[in-house]
Amino acid sequence: MTSTAGAARYKVFVLNLVLAARIGVHPHEKVRPPRLRVSVELDMAGDPPHHDELAEAVDYERVVADIRQLAVARHINLVETFADAVARLCLTDARVVGVCVTVEKLDVYPDAESVGITLERRRAD
């Protein structure tokens, strides 16, 4: 009997992380950091962990901590720059072959839930 299963792929994600960030081009955003909603989806190479050990997995707690640190580390003008920095952080783990980052600014317009961008990056071969 031959196996029809192909190479495994799986995703790790963090959805709708809400935080205040040092971001924006307007003076009021530099005084009072606006709220962002950040979601990331990591495309993983290979099989999920086989031995039920955290050391074999991408730790989403570390991903969240890195995003939170980036949000307060320095002032960033554009959500595009923030999303790119998040994507690059995620791709530092060799097991991550691609990432999709969505960054939304909340509370910008009273008649819109959010404004923002989605950015995708793939590891260069």
Image: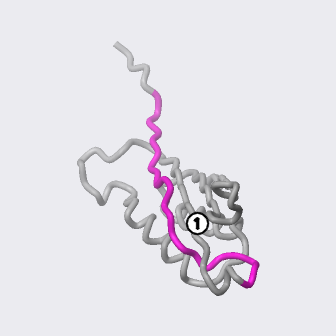
| Numbered range of the magenta stretch | 6-27
- Seen in the picture, residue 53 relative to 50 is either above or below; the reply is below
Residue depicted at 60% across the width and 52% down the height = 100
Q: How many numbered marks are there?
A: 1
Q: Front-most of 40 and 5?
A: 40
Residue 106 x %, y % = 62, 63
Residue situated furthest front in the rendering: 110
| Residue 24 falls inside the magenta stretch | yes
- Seen at 40% across and 57% down, the residue is 58
Residue 88 lies, in percent from the top left, at: 60, 65
Q: Nearer the viewer, residue 37 or 67?
A: 37
Residue 116 in view: no
The colour scheme used to paint the residues is: one colour
The vertical placement of 121 against 92, above or below, is above
Q: Nearer the viewer, residue 1 or 57?
A: 57
Please name the residue shown 28% across and 57% down the image.
54
Determine the residue located farthest toward the bottom in the rendered image: 31
Helix, strand or loop at mark 1:
strand
Q: Quadrant of residue 113?
A: bottom right
Amino acid type for the residue under numbered disc 1: Leu
Asked whether the viewer can see residue 82, the reply is yes
Residue 115: where, in percent of width, then height?
A: 69, 58
Within 10 Å of disc 1 (Cα), the crowding (few <14, some 14-19, many 20+) is many
Please identify the quadrant where the N terminus is shown.
top left
The quadrant in which residue 26 appears is: bottom right
Task: Say whether residue 123 is left or right of residue 60.
Answer: right
**Where in the figure is residue 89, as x and y percent of width and height?**
55, 67
Residue 55 lies in the magenta stretch: no
What residue sits 60% from the left and 56% below the top? 101
Q: Which residue is mark 1?
A: 36
The front one of 103 and 49 is: 103
